[in-house]
Image: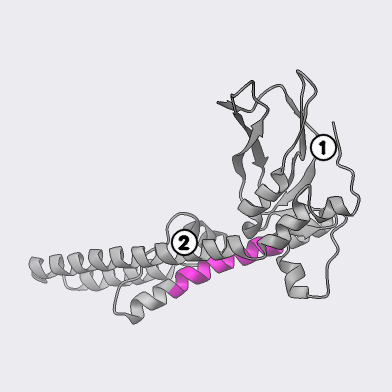
Amino acid sequence: MENINPPSAKPNKGVRFYNPGDRFEEPISYSMPGIGDIHCIARWPVKAEAGNFFQVPTELRLLHDGTRLNVDFPTTVLQRFADRGVVMIDEEFAPGEDEDRNERMPFAVDEAAAKAKGDAKWIKYLQTIVKNHINACDRARAAGGFPLEAQGFTKRALKLLNMQDPAAMAFDSFKKQVAIAPDAPQQVQSAEAAQLRAELDETKDMLRKLVAGLAAKEQLDDQQAIEEQSAPNGRRSQRGRNPQTA
């Protein structure tokens, strides 16, 4: 049985985050006590405005009987959005001596530090997306193919960084070359168009695999340390933090 956003569940103040990038809204599933053999799955909506702070609970209280449910929403938020710059505010976060690792860890001790780190991680995320696209274009040209124009978020990343798409520039150049010879036989132009479509399809498949591999790697990077820092039963509770309740 599924209950979406149950009105009988009241959250505690929870954990605060900073979202440096685009607005997102996504539900997080969690288990609720059932009746008899009935198992209930509910969903809590996580909403984050662009370039702003947001909050998720670590405990829900069921108003009909007072039952308190511990929920690990902070860890889920970081698993899904830390790669794009979302930073969790934890006043007990203690940076180590490894500066590179400190930069990767999506934690900050206060709002000012969270905003500074989050904004930097968001720009780096956009640059990584664009760099992967440019590398794919270079490989396509080196193989004698035709680069695929940016799509979806890659296209948006180029716009946010005020950069031109090298694939679009190459395609514009190709169209100009075709326009220079309007008297070329129709069958020659058709053959070129068919070859172009085939090369675009091949490049699209290659780019899709590249992006999928990158996403998988980012999900695994430092995951154990993130879970240990953000989970209610992790290192923070072992240091004696008392959870905030409603």
Q: Is residue 33 left or right of residue 136?
A: right
Point out the residue furthest to the front here: 37
> Of residues 198 and 10, which is closer to you in this image?
10
* Disc on the earlier residue, 1 or 2: 1
The quadrant in which residue 151 appears is: bottom left
Disc 2 marks which amino acid?
Ala
x 49%, y 70%: residue: 132
The C terminus lies in quadrant: top right
Q: How is the image coloured?
A: one colour
In the image, 67 versus 109, the foreground residue is: 67
Alpha-carbon neighbours of circle 1 within 10 Å: few (<14), some, or many (≥20)? Answer: some
Q: Residue 134, how many percent across, how many down? A: 46, 72
Residue at 34% over, 67% down? 203
Whether residue 99 is situated above or below residue 204 in the rendered picture:
below
| Magenta segment boundaries in residue numbering | 120-135
Q: Which residue is mark 1?
A: 13
Q: Does the rendering let one see residue 21?
A: no
Residue 232 shown in magenta? no
Q: Is residue 131 located in the magenta-colored stretch of the structure?
A: yes
Q: Is residue 104 visible?
A: yes
- Label 2 belongs to which residue? 212
The image quarter containing residue 194 is: bottom left
Percent x, y for residue 111? 82, 53
